[in-house]
Every structure is written in C-alpha cells, then in structure tokens.
Image: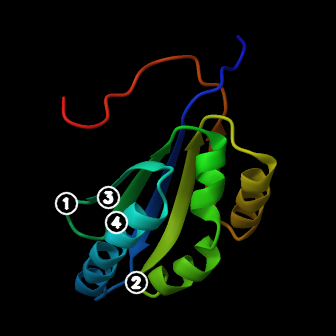
Amino acid sequence: MVAMDGPIVFVSRNRVKPGMLDAFLAHYRATVPMTEANKPDTLVQLAYLSEDGTEVTVVRVFASADGLDRQLQGAEERSKATYAFIEPVSVELYGTPSDYVMEMMRKVAGSGIDVRVDPQFIGGFTRLGPG
C-alpha cells in the first residue's frame, strides 16, 4: 500500500502530577486562545481528562506535516511551563511527519517516553466547522 499525503494527527498522553490538576486546568485553558491565535495550522486541539483526573490526553490535527512543524516551533519553551503540572507518558503520530519532527520524536523516545508513528495515511475525511 502506498502512503498518501494527508493530515497529521498528534496525540500526547500525560500523567497529571499529584495535587496539580486545578493548576494544570487553569494553565491549559489559558494557553488554548494563544495557540488558536498564533498557530493557524493547528486545525484541531482537544483535551480529554480521565475519569479519575490523573491523566490528560491532548489531540491535535494538522492538514499537513508543515502544520505540525510550525506547531512544534517553540514547543520546548512552552512544554517547560506545562511540565510543571503534567509529565508526558506517550506520543502518537498518525501520518507522515517531516524529518524535523522525527528528530524531535527520537529525542522524546530517548528520554523514555513511548513514541508511536503510523505514517501511512490511506484515506478518510474531516468535517471541520459548523456541520
């Protein structure tokens, strides 16, 4: 099967540090408008909290690998602030990321965080906006 150009889905799973849930939620909610305003290639950003409040999963969707590249520019600095509240457990990438992103993922994996990449987009559709 041949890979097709297509969207990139980035999923990060994180453990909420003990006693930090409320602070994390405030931090996350404060950063969403900045991401929405400054990262127009981020088509979707959604966060989900586990029932017991100990884990948070963030899902981001980009139209292309270039969009993910632009999202990750400056991510190290943003992550430092976020990691005061959470610690990464795993990263999943769906689609074909750039060499830049793959290099970053090798660094992430080298730090002991699970990284999964499923590069072959085989088709589908999105419905973004009012439906």
Residue labelled with disc 1: 51
Q: Tag 3 or tag 2, which sits nearer the N-term?
A: 3
Front residue of 51 and 103: 103
Q: CB of mark 1 within 8 Å of CB of mark 3?
A: no
First in residue order: circle 3 vs circle 4: 3
Kindly report the distance in space between the C-alpha atoms of the residues bearing marks 1 and 2: 18 Å
- Would you name the residue on which mark 2 appears? 85
Q: How many C-alpha atoms fall within 10 Å of the one at disc 2: few (<14), some, or many (≥20)?
A: many
* Residue carrying label 3: 47
At a point 69% along the width and 43% down the height, the residue shown is: 97
Q: Which residue is painted at 68% across and 67% down in the image?
A: 112
Rounded to the nearest angstrom, the CA distance separating label 1 from label 3 is 13 Å
* Residue 47 percent across, percent down from the top left: 32, 58
SS category of the residue bearing label 2: loop
Query: According to the image, label 4 marks what residue?
Result: 55
Q: Secondary structure at mark 1?
A: loop
Amino acid type, label 1: Glu
- Residue 78: image location, x then y, percent: 53, 79
Which comes before the other along the chain, label 1 or label 2? 1
**Which amino acid type is shown beneath numbered disc 2?**
Phe
Based on the displayed image, in which of its 4 quarters is residue 116 positioned? Answer: top right
Tell me the crowding category of disc 1: few under 14, some 14 to 19, or many 20 or more residues within 10 angstroms, Cα based. few
Distance Cα–Cα, label 2 vs label 4: 11 Å
